[in-house]
Image (cartoon, rainbow, N blue to C red):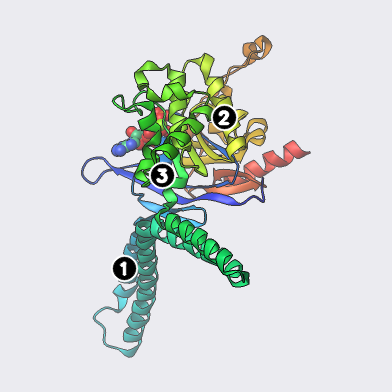
Amino acid sequence: MDNGEVLLKVEDLCQYFKIGPGNELKAVDHVSFDIKKGEVFGLVGESGCGKTTTGRSIIRLYDITSGSVYFKGQRICAGVRSYKDAIKQACLDYETKAAPYKGKQDEESLQAIARLKAERDEILLDQKAKMQAARYDHKNCNKLYAQEQVKKIEAEYAPLLAAETDEEKKAALLKEKNEKVRLAKKDRIMNSMQMIFQDPIASLNPRMTVREIIAEGLIIRGIKDKKYIDEQVYRVLNLVGLVEEHAGRYPHEFSGGQRQRIGIARSIILNPDLIIADEPISALDVSIQAQVINLLNGLREQLGLTILFIAHDLSVVKYFSDRIGVMYYGKMVELAPSDELFDHPLHPYTKSLLSAIPLPDPEYERGRKRITYNPLAEHDYSVQQPTMREVKPGHFILCNDAEFAKYTEEVNKVKA
Ligand SMILES: Nc1ncnc2c1ncn2[C@@H]1O[C@H](COP(=O)(O)OP(=O)(O)OP(=O)(O)O)[C@@H](O)[C@H]1O
Ligand SMILES: [Mg+2]
């Protein structure tokens, strides 16, 4: 999976919410990770740590504060705070450095001020360009994607058209190409990314039939052919284990598990590449949780889906995820392949999460000790702030130099 094509890349994502004057809540704070095509990436952490906010930011339900999100190679979200901060900092630095020379007329002082100004202006220019590019990409991602798709179709058909000597066949080919171009122009990159919500009751409009709910995406996309819409609705209903007769009914006529199936059907109708599943089973009865997980796993294989799977419980994501990211208070604290995370957790918060999972083994249960995580006692970040570092290939952890040394030692001990 390591060499796979990256489908989603989240880079330094920050989502800060204003809470009162001059006050911000850093719901997501400098989070980075990527998801490869075909992969299931689990995002876990306790309530309020920023999982939903991460998902909603990626799918553009919020404008992000800072950072970038790339999807299928195209930047779809970009925030400008970091560039603004860099500009502010450059101006402050200039004021501090230039202070001793201010008001002086000697050649040396004048030169120093000119040099510092040039230094500052270079940073300003660079950051302003980045800001402009970010705003442009954020605003135009769908248009840029459509242009890219059209270009690809043109490139695919150009040699075919050039090689075709039969006029009639050539005309047919041209018609085929033009139809593809017409649809591609309407294609939005965000159609390839869909979300399944935590609460299957609240997320389905009670006044709409199942058919209307599921078909909404197609209709928004400008598809009007009723027969085609029905075919697609029945196709996805079958995929999620429901039947055609269900299409005419209303959400309240279904059980919780069935409603979540309707939510899943809605999310796959546009043939997305990426599904963001935000705790899709936590509102469900334990007895049907496994069914929904199995359904998602089956769809992943059948449709080649890539899934960002959000959960607060590590045991749920263990078997389903290829890699897992652990979040704590807006930060990603550890990221590793699923087995690695369970077998060799390094961050004390991950260890605490793992210690909370009960196992169906009485012997183990008797000896199981819940580890509580106390960040103030665990970390001393007074000298140096932590950053995400790779302790061993594919295993990342939020730490500073001192902790990195400690974790590296721990890793080597395991190997020995
Ligand atoms: N629109 C908003 N405005 C202000 N604060 C918000 C907003 N949305 C979320 N928050 C806050 O951001 C933090 C992260 O919330 P989020 O919903 O992302 O957590 P979560 O990890 O999904 O939790 P849960 O497991 O309970 O779903 C919380 O403190 C929450 O109160
Ligand atoms: Mg949530």
Corner quadrant of residue 362: top right
- Can I make out residue 50 in this image? no
**Is there CB contact under 8 Å for labels 2 and 3?**
no
Q: Which of the four quarters of the rendered structure image does ligand 1 lie in? A: top left
Instruction: Give the vertical position of 128 relative to 279 (above or below).
Output: below
Which circle's residue, 1 or 2, is located before the other in the chain?
A: 1
Q: Which residue is mark 2?
A: 317
Which circle's residue, 2 or 3, is located before the other in the chain?
A: 3
Q: Quadrant of the N terminus?
A: top right
Q: Secondary structure at mark 2?
A: helix
**Left or right: where 92 falls relative to 13:** left
* Residue 280 horizontal/vertical position (percent): 47, 28
Of badges 1 and 2, nearer the viewer stands 2
Q: Is disc 1 surrounded by few (<14), some (14 to 19) or many (20+) residues within 10 Å?
A: some
In terms of depth relative to the viewer, which is nearer, 180 or 123?
180
Going 56% across and 65% down the picture, which residue do you hit? 168
Numbered circle sitting on residue 91: 1
